[in-house]
Image: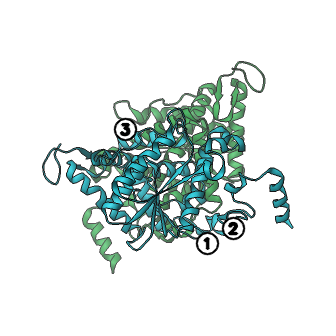
Chain colours: A cyan, B green
Amino acid sequence: MRCRKCGEKAVINMRQHKLALCSTHFLDWVPEQVERAIKMYHMFTHNDRLLVAVSGGKDSLSLWDILNRLGYAADGLYIGLGIDGGVNYSVNSLLYARTFAQEHKLHLRVKDIKAEYGETVPELTIRTHRGRYKPCSVCGLTKRHVMNQLAHENEYTALLTGHNLDDEAAILFGNTLSWVGSYLIRQGPVLEADRPGLVRKVKPLCRMYEREMAAYALLRGTPYIHEECPHAEGSTSIYYKELLNKLESDRPGAKLSFYLSFLQARRAGLFSSSADERAELVHSCFKCGQPTSAPGLCAFCRMFVKDEYHLVLNELDEL
Amino acid sequence: MRCRKCGEKAVINMRQHKLALCSTHFLDWVPEQVERAIKMYHMFTHNDRLLVAVSGGKDSLSLWDILNRLGYAADGLYIGLGIDGGVNYSVNSLLYARTFAQEHKLHLRVKDIKAEYGETVPELTIRTHRGRYKPCSVCGLTKRHVMNQLAHENEYTALLTGHNLDDEAAILFGNTLSWVGSYLIRQGPVLEADRPGLVRKVKPLCRMYEREMAAYALLRGTPYIHEECPHAEGSTSIYYKELLNKLESDRPGAKLSFYLSFLQARRAGLFSSSADERAELVHSCFKCGQPTSAPGLCAFCRMFVKDEYHLVLNELDEL
């Protein structure tokens, strides 16, 4: 297999694009594709203040690297979730994030959940009995809360995450299997800051396959944490990814076409705007001030109040 | 495994319903479920004139049998497509349909495409170069045309097909992968007769799994054609069925929940009515008078005009 651009030996063949490239041209091609997505979906410009959520994995570190190469100034945010899982997961992933920031002279903000809130995410999960002792639900809630709060307080105008096409297609697949309208309607490369206190969220890697991002990190020589989060094992999203990979291997391009045709259908007006229930629910959390879907405390702050206090708040709210 | 109703040995375990039944109770349960669907989706009443499209397979013959047991008077329609495929497919399937009708003293109408239009479906496919020599597209077009025309001319008020849940879920899956709005919006247990000349189409088996229908035919002792249509091999719909079966075996009930949550989301207003492009396109075919999406001849009648005549018609149409 030869590189389409120079005829040298190709290192990757992207069947969905019918495109094989050598290392040099692949490392040029990836940022070009990301820049195209940034512009196509009007994600941000060079005047925005950007914050990248960095986990220490290949996607977020590569995203930060690509932004840097494209000349976008972006700070990083690492959230210490306190996950050990027998592999020292959080400690190691912070190390990768710090190393990357130091080597590229970038500013990494670090927020440690235990230091800030007194408990790690697994501890919070056990105490609050949320998610049947799988911390994934508390973890997602915590990350969304902390990311948005920090971005808002520090006046970032866009919050970037490293979701790749495989992530997005798996989320879309799950949302489609259950046909939850409010999720379907809001999924996409850009989540607008449509309530006071929310920061615009964007996913510049949404058109990049996971294997392209793995190849990019490898060829750029970026050290990253190879382990998946120990709690992700057996998760629904991994199951959907496997199913979609089966589809992709039988029909190259199926994942990309599934996601892009969804975006196109939505843009063309497939969904009724009245189906977005979330739009009508605008409240501010009593405690943190962030937007929430119900009056009182937001789901994150509810984890930190005693039951009696919470009842009082609910009663006050009903008056 | 014991029957939930009587404790006798069960012949089938329906994991998605957490229900095991013996032969007697399963043979009662199936018509009850079908009757529920008929009422739930307001498909038809005992006052309707019903026509069942009968292929000679387990689904359509069982549907006819169930209707008969439920006291709905329904005629059958067999369309002779002229498919041989080395297994004498059409000849044999007609035999099964005739035998069933005779044994149950039901009226079977037979329409032979070759006798009526001069060519079999495979012959039409080759001459018209439609569908890359796979007759499935011509076959679908022909069946829709003939079924509707005959039902309309004979004043039937509902046209029933034997689509089961596996069929419906596979169609929905395909429509979802490509996000074709007009297909998504119209898929369901009932296709209203929303244009003059169209007969209401209903799918009373839409909640029944394929394996339930196979078990029903077997236990009722209904002889049916076991072969799939020889042209179906390698088809997209069979591929999607396999993928959904994988999902179902890992998560019992996934297929049913996928289909039902789609119907519920649609009923709740997920889709914008403006996305149904088809609604605006109401024309009558010059030749057969059936509704069609473009002015001139319908897709079926276009197969039988010479190219020059067709050009003239198009030119006339542009004046």
Residue B195 in view: no
Residue beneath label 3, please? B234
Residue extending furthest toward the bottom: B319
Q: Position of residue A176 (x, y in %)?
A: 54, 51
Label 1 close to label 3 by CB (< 8 Å)? no
Under tag 1, what secondary structure? Answer: loop
The residue beneath circle 2 is: A284
The residue at the point 82 percent across, 55 percent down is A309
The residue depicted at 39 percent of the width and 54 percent of the height is A101
Amino acid on which the number 2 mark rests in the picture: Ser
Regarding residue B90, the answer to whether it shows in the image is: yes
Q: Which mark is residue A113?
A: none
Q: CA distance from mark 2 to mark 1?
A: 9 Å
Image x and y of residue A223, in percent? 35, 44
What is the x, y in percent for residue B11?
65, 22
In primary-sequence order, the first of circles 2 and 1 is 1
Q: Nearer the viewer, residue B152 or B283?
A: B283
Marks 1 & 3 on one chain: no
Q: Split into 4 quadrants, where in the image is the C terminus of chain A?
A: bottom right
- CA distance separating discs 2 and 3: 55 Å
Quadrant of res B26: top right
Q: Chain of mark 1?
A: A
